[in-house]
Image: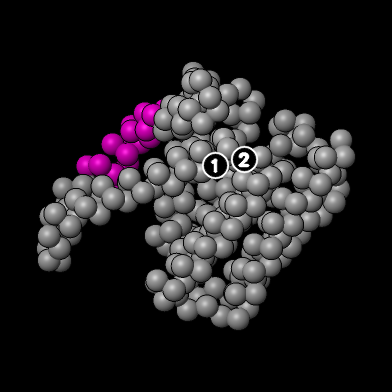
Amino acid sequence: LKLAPVGAAFAAGQVATVASLGAVAVSFTHVVKALEPAVNAIASALVLGQVFHPMVYASLLPVFAGVALASSKELSFTMFGFLTAVASNFFFVTRNVLATKFGDVGDMGEDKTQRKTNQLAVLTGVATLVLLPVVVLLPGGLTSVPAAWKAALATGTAPSKLWYRLVASGFYFFMYQLSSFWVLSCVPPITHSVLNTLKRVVIIVVSIIVFRTPVTPQSAAGTAIAIGGVLLYSLTKAHYAKKK
């Protein structure tokens, strides 16, 4: 039963992220998701009692400023896309806090990499079970799949191409999650945080190039400030952690 809230938060975070990606530019979703460390720092203090040095919290200010700057001139901005991206931060932070509070989830295996792999497998399974009743009852959920499939075929897309896209997107998304867990099992948390920041830079830049997303100078500056703020936060947090 302890796994149910963790799985529910994990599922809700994934749904909110996908909803945001469908409403605004991919790059903008990831700029807003850069706020996750800030939400995590606040939630850890309130729920777990983990209070950091004041300079750690001060290092989060560029993140807030960057996201605000990028949002104000984002050409693809919609309130729904922004709010679902923010919601995904809260859901994923809830997952992290609950997992810490309840102990290791799916902690089985002989080495750390194997344990992290099993941890993700268990968490994904629980999240699927939690989400299944929702997608069955929700309008536009599983019951709408036949109609959506027919509409896609009506556009001239071959069934084999649709199946490929469904399977490939699911596979790559799961491997993205799994590789993140593998990296976390092989490197210190600070290294993982820095790599995660660089990953977000790559996603933003590549998505702008591939989807030819128009970017204003103010939005680009806000994105750079936000990503730089996340990196500053990670380094500041590690610096003061060593002094304890």
- Colouring convention used in this rendered image of the protein: one colour
Look at label 1 and name its amino acid.
Val
Crowd around label 1: few <14 · some 14–19 · many ≥20 (10 Å): some
Residue 5 appears in the picture as rendered:
no
What's the magenta region? 125-143
In the rendered image, residue 144, in percent from the top left (x then y), is placed at 22, 47
Q: Is residue 3 found inside the magenta-colored segment of the image?
A: no
Q: Is residue 131 found inside the magenta-colored segment of the image?
A: yes
Q: Secondary structure at mark 2?
A: loop
Q: Which residue is mark 1?
A: 183
Q: Which residue is mark 2?
A: 187
* Residue drawn 71% across the image and 60% down it: 229
Please name whichever residue, 196 or 41, is drawn nearer the observer in this view of the structure.
196
Q: Which dot marks residue 156?
A: none
Q: Secondary structure at mark 1?
A: helix
Look at label 2 and name its amino acid.
Val
Question: Does 113 sit left or right of 194 as displayed?
Answer: left
* Residue drawn 49% across the image and 61% down it: 203
Question: Does 42 sit left or right of 14 as displayed?
Answer: right
